[in-house]
Amino acid sequence: MSVIEVPADAREAVKARRRKEIDELDYRRQLRRLEDAGYTQKQIGTWLGIAQPSVLSALRTAAKVPMPLEGFSGATPDEICQRYAGGLISRAQLVDELTRFPYAKGGKTDGYDSLIVDPPGTWSEVSDAVRRGLIEDDIYEEVFNRRHGNAESTAEKSAAPRKMSARDRALRTAREIASAIGGGEVREKNGKLVIRTKAGDFLVLEHRNAATHAGRNVVKVRGAARMPAGSVAAKSGGRSTLRRDGD
C-alpha cells in the first residue's frame, strides 16, 4: 500500500499526533539555541518550570537532534514531509523544499549480499513518505519531474513525465513489499534485490526493462511461497505491477 487511507473522523487526530512529534523536535532545538546563546541550565530550568537535572538530561538528548538546513523547515526530507502531513507547511512550500533539498547519495553495496542502508537525507525518504501516507502520489511525481528538469505547468498536462530509473523503481517497490509483509531487510545481490523477511524467507525482485503489460512495468516476485496470491499490488500510471511466479 503506497498511501495510508485515513477516515475523515480520524484525520485531525493523525495530524495532531504528527504535530506532537514535530513539536518535540522543535522543543529540543530551542533548548540547544538557549544553551548556545550562553544561558545557564538554572536559568533555562526556571523559565521552563523544570529542575536543573531535567534540563541537563534534555540538553543531552537535544544535542543529538540535527538542526534544520538553512532555507528549509527541516533537517531531512522525512521531517519536511512530516511537517506537511501535520499541517505546518503548505503544499507549495513542501514541493519547493523537496525540489531544492541537497539529497545525500543512497547507500551502496559491494555487489554481493550486502545490506542497503541509506544515510539520512536521501531520496528514499521521499519514497517512504508516500508509502506512509505523509505526502500524496501527485506531489512525489511533481517533485521528481522538477528535479529532473521536466516540471510541467497545470496547462501542460500532456507533457510526458520523465520516468524513474529501473533500479530506483525496483528499490521503491522492494521497500513497499517489505513493509506490507511485516518488515524485512532489502539487500542487493548480483544485481537483484532480495527481501529477507522476519520469517527467514527470501523474496527476489527482478526488474525487466523491456517487459511491459498493459502499459505497466512488470516486476516479478520469486520465492514468495509465504505471500498469499493477490497480496501484492498492481499500480497503473507508470508504476509497477507485481505478480508471483506462475501467476
Image (cartoon, rainbow, N blue to C red):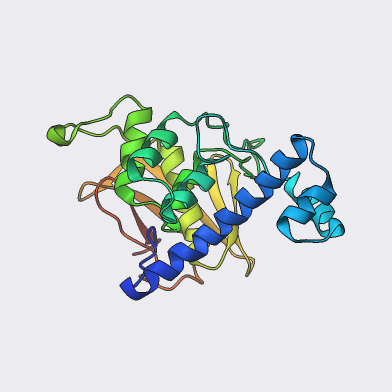
Q: Which residue is more in the foreground, 134 or 231?
A: 134
**Which residue in the rendered view is the most extreme toward the right?**
53
Split into 4 quadrants, where in the image is the N terminus?
bottom left
Q: Between residues 245 and 131, which one lies in front from this camera angle?
A: 131
Position of residue 106 in the picture relative to residue 82 (left or right): right
Front residue (pair 194, 127) = 127
Q: Is residue 191 above or below residue 240?
A: above
How many discs mark residues in the rendered view?
A: 0
Residue 158 visible in image: no
Question: Which percent across, then down, holds residue 198?
Answer: 63, 67
Q: Is residue 155 left or right of residue 12?
A: left
Quarter of the image for residue 157 reads top left
Q: On the picture, is 220 further left or further right than 213?
A: right
**Which quadrant would the C terminus be assigned to in this image?**
bottom left
Residue name at image x 34 percent, y 52 percent = 136
Residue 210 in percent (x, y) is at 31, 38
Query: On the picture, is 100 further left or further right than 109?
Result: left
Residue located farthest toward the top when viewing the structure as drawn: 149
Residue 113: image quadrant is top right
Res. 103 visible in picture: yes
Whether 209 is drawn above or below 85: the answer is above
Q: Residue at x 36, y 36 (%)?
A: 143
Q: Please say if 181 is above or below 78.
A: below
Q: Nearer the viewer, residue 47 or 121?
A: 47
Q: Residue at x 83, y 61 (%)?
A: 51
Residue 15: give x, y in percent of width and height: 44, 62
